[in-house]
Image (spheres, rainbow, N blue to C red):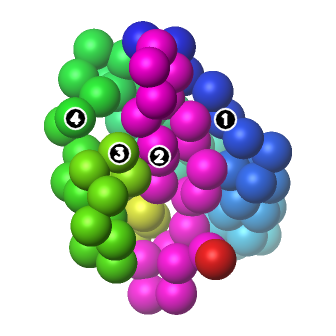
Amino acid sequence: MKIKFLISAMEDMRSIKAFIAKDNPKAAVRMIKKIRAAVKHLEEFPHSGRIIPETANPQLREVIISNYRIMYQISDSTINIFAVYEGHRLPPS
């Protein structure tokens, strides 16, 4: 399957990297690499993430890495990453 990062998810990742980099630039790079590795895994195993608990839609799923939720939607041949954010926050609307 093809992975597509929506603009919202790319902005989320930039914000995460900038926030972590204030204290530890190397940790920021490591976290982004972990997130990207988790997303890469979805190419082969798109249903490996759990259904987002706030929804009942089996096409809306998430993977949790550290304290970040990577939310995605499965369509015919594409996985659309639409949000990456800290788990203690409310999901994007």
Task: Tell me which segment is drawn in magenta.
Answer: 70-92
Instruction: Name the residue carrying label 4.
Output: 47
Which one is in front in this view, the residue at disc 1 or the one at disc 3? Answer: 3
Decide whether residue 31 is among the magenta residues: no
Which one is in front in this view, the residue at disc 4 or the one at disc 3? Answer: 3
Looking at the rendered structure, the kind of residue marked 2 is: Tyr
Distance Cα–Cα, label 2 vs label 1: 9 Å
Instruction: Name the residue carrying label 3.
Output: 59
74 shown above or below 7: above
Looking at the rendered structure, the kind of residue marked 3 is: Gln
Badge 4: residue crowd in 10 Å (few <14, some 14–19, many ≥20): some
Badge 2: residue crowd in 10 Å (few <14, some 14–19, many ≥20): many
Q: Position of residue 2 (x, y in %)?
A: 52, 14
Q: Which disc number belongs to residue 5?
A: 1
Q: Secondary structure at mark 4?
A: helix
Q: Position of residue 16 (x, y in %)?
A: 67, 62
| Residue drawn at x 77%, y 63% as measured from the top left | 15
Q: Secondary structure at mark 2?
A: strand
Horizontal side of residue 44 vs 71, given as left or right:
left
Looking at the rendered structure, the kind of residue marked 4 is: His
